[in-house]
Image: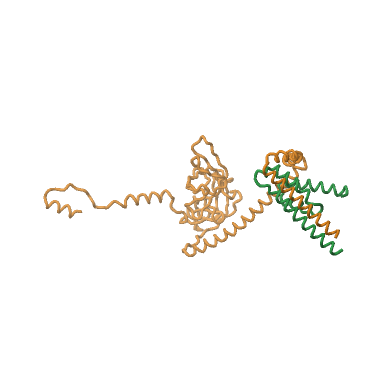
Amino acid sequence: MKVQSQRSYRRRRTIRVALVAILIVISGWFLPSVFAMISALIMSPFHATNQWLDESSSLVPTFIRDRQSLQEEIQQLENQLQISSRTSVTQQRLLLENNRLRGLLGASDESRVVAGVIARPNTLPYDFLQIDRGINDGIEVGAPVFVGTDIVIGLVAHTAQRYSFVELFTTPGFEATIFLSGPDVVAKMYGMGGGVARVSLPQGIPIQIGNLVHVPSVEPGVFGQIAYIESEPTQPEQYGYVTPNTALNSLYQVSVGRVSQISQSVEEIDERVRKEIQTRLVVEGVSLEVATSTNQATTSEQEEI
Amino acid sequence: MTFFRGCIAVSTYLVIVFLFMQGHILLGAITVVLYTFAFSAVALLPLAIVLDGYYGAFYAAPVLSICAIGWYLLSETLRSAVNIVQSEHE
């Protein structure tokens, strides 16, 4: 009986407290500014402490903030790791698909000759490489030189019986038409020497550090990445400086392709197409002549046509 | 309530305040549950109302206050149910 009365008392008290709280909340709804003012007054010491935790450079707040930022960084890195692992799977799938499609199209793999690097730019006067393969091994002048699978670094400039010289894209005065992925533009690349080439583009094209530089004339051909950007708003052009992905001093072996791997340049193809279009509408043997009054003359002219 | 128990109650209460103010909602909710079972949820009602007022929630919907009232009712119902079971076993 006593337990029953205690229980009912507790229940009544709970309901009373809940009703009072609901009443306060409803009155707060009707008078939000008054509640905000009273709450701000009550919370002022807590507000000050919270500000101290957020902004102070003391030991404890700094420790708490550093911990939070480290946790956020760990979370971000874990997300990036997940994304990159998925990307690598995607790359593998695309590689397999590419090989399969090349097989279906009958595209044969190009043959390459592996050559050791005898001399490098720091021992040779310009941006040249000397390799230990020559005419005897089937090296041709103009053949592309690769590092790895698809990084093209230059062309064979001279061949002897047992050695060859490779002119790097970074040789001063070397010009090549490149395709810059990212802004997706075609531009001219000029060799600057010292393992650096320069791409000049008009202002306003959004180039970024890390944009890949493709050499579309060579298949497959990636040269490197934009490593530095020189852009002054007052100048009409901006420059992207390109370096190969592999340091030239660390080159030990390269592979030399065939001249047939270099396709026609875009300009040449464009010129040919333009000529073709211009000459297509011209019909040979058609000439406009002045018509005469005699029937015989007209007949003879018609026969000519 | 002993002095030691009172100190623990006050410090836990302050921890709840700062956890909510720092935005650690999940940790705050866990501490609220522990606080309710160790002490009572009545003290959480004014805290929720003041926090709602401080963040201007009364201009829209005072979610924290409504949750606190719901949590208070639920915890008191559970507490009375547990007491009934205890009294029946005694």
Position of residue B51 measured from the top left corner of the image (x, y, whole percent): 72, 44
Q: Is residue A65 something that shows in the picture?
A: no
Numbered disc total: 0
Q: Quadrant of the C terminus of chain A?
A: bottom left
B15 and A221: which is toward the camera: B15
Q: Name the residue at 12% across, 48% down.
A: A293
Position of residue B16 measured from the top left corner of the image (x, y, whole percent): 76, 48
A81 and A215: which is toward the camera: A81
Q: Is residue A116 something that shows in the picture?
A: yes
Q: Which chain is green?
A: B
Q: Name the residue at 84% across, 47% down.
A: B7
Q: Which chain is orange?
A: A
Position of residue B11 measured from the top left corner of the image (x, y, whole percent): 81, 46
Q: In this picture, is A120 found above or below A102?
A: above
Q: Residue furthest right?
A: B2
Position of residue B76 measured from the top left corner of the image (x, y, whole percent): 78, 55
Residue B1 as seen in the image, left or right of residue A106 = right
